[in-house]
Image (tube, helix red, strand yellow):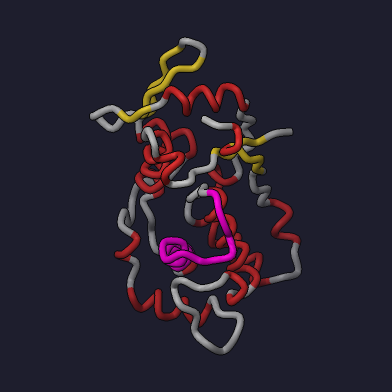
Amino acid sequence: MASSLIRNSHHIDFEPVFGLDDAGMVQMFETLIATGLKEFLGCPTVFYEDALTEFFANSSVREDGMVVSTIGGTAIEISQEMFAAGFELPSDGLIDLTDVPKNFVFDARSLFSDSKEQVSMSCLKKALKFQYRLLHDILAKTIYVKAGSFDYVTRDRFLLMTAITFDVKINWSSLLFGVFKEMVTPGSQQEKDYVIQILSY
């Protein structure tokens, strides 16, 4: 994989957030933690660029859904169960984001808006209240990990923000492993603009 697809990223340190004076920001982070993503978003593990590059260069998805690769000649197999257990991801809840209740989506269009006007599901990020801009960026850079502009809210991100805000259970195991499989499918790194996020210190 080309090194241009690798970017630096930092895990989320949740503890200092609760000392903030901004109640809306604190509530947004509390809601995010309640989803069960704390281990995934707060993972402080250091990924080494060479090993990560080799992993993605050699990776594929087997017919049984297992992600396979090699690093330094060692075979690696990752199942959805292993992936979910590693990050303590919930496996109950919605798999299809279009199943987020329509009444929550309607309410979110007002709740997220930085004005008195409802926002659309595909809008500019600057139309959102500050805490929802931050939630959008967290999802854009950690869940969807795609290159490109972060100035626009996509429909999928809006639905995911709505689900998180209104405590709709999401099958994070399925959702995130699905993204992972797309990332390792030959051609999709280039075609879908996925960016490999590495933590460097």
Q: Is residue 8 above or below residue 70?
A: below
Q: Is residue 12 above or below residue 124?
A: above
Residue positioned 41% across, 34% down in the render: 184
Residue at the limit of the structure toward the top, as seen here: 73
Q: For the point 33% across and 55% down, which residue is it?
A: 93
Residue 161 falls within the magenta-colored stretch? yes
Which one is in front, 88 or 149? 149
Q: Nearer the viewer, residue 101 or 122?
A: 122
Judge by depth and name the residue closer to the eye, 180 or 58: 58
Where residue 131 appears, as percent x and y from the top left, is 63, 68
Question: Is residue 1 located in the magenta-colored stretch of the structure?
Answer: no
Rendering coords of residue 41 (x, y %): 57, 46
For this view, does 125 lie left or right of residue 193? right
Quadrant housing residue 10: top right
* Residue at horizontal 75 percent and vertical 69 percent from the top: 21
Question: Image check: 94 left or right of 200?
Answer: left
Q: Going by the picture, which residue comes out furthest to the left?
A: 63
Q: Tag count in the figure?
A: 0
User: Which of the 4 image quarters holds residue 174?
Assistant: top left
Image quarter of residue 104: bottom left
Where does the image place residue 73, in percent across and percent down from the top left? 47, 10
In the rendered image, the quadrant that contains the C terminus is top right
Residue furthest out toward the bottom = 116
- What stretch of residues is rendered in magenta? 147-164
Residue 178 drawn at (x, y percent): 36, 43
Confirm whether residue 167 shows in the render.
no
166 with respect to 61 (left or right): right
Can residue 97 be spotted in the picture? yes
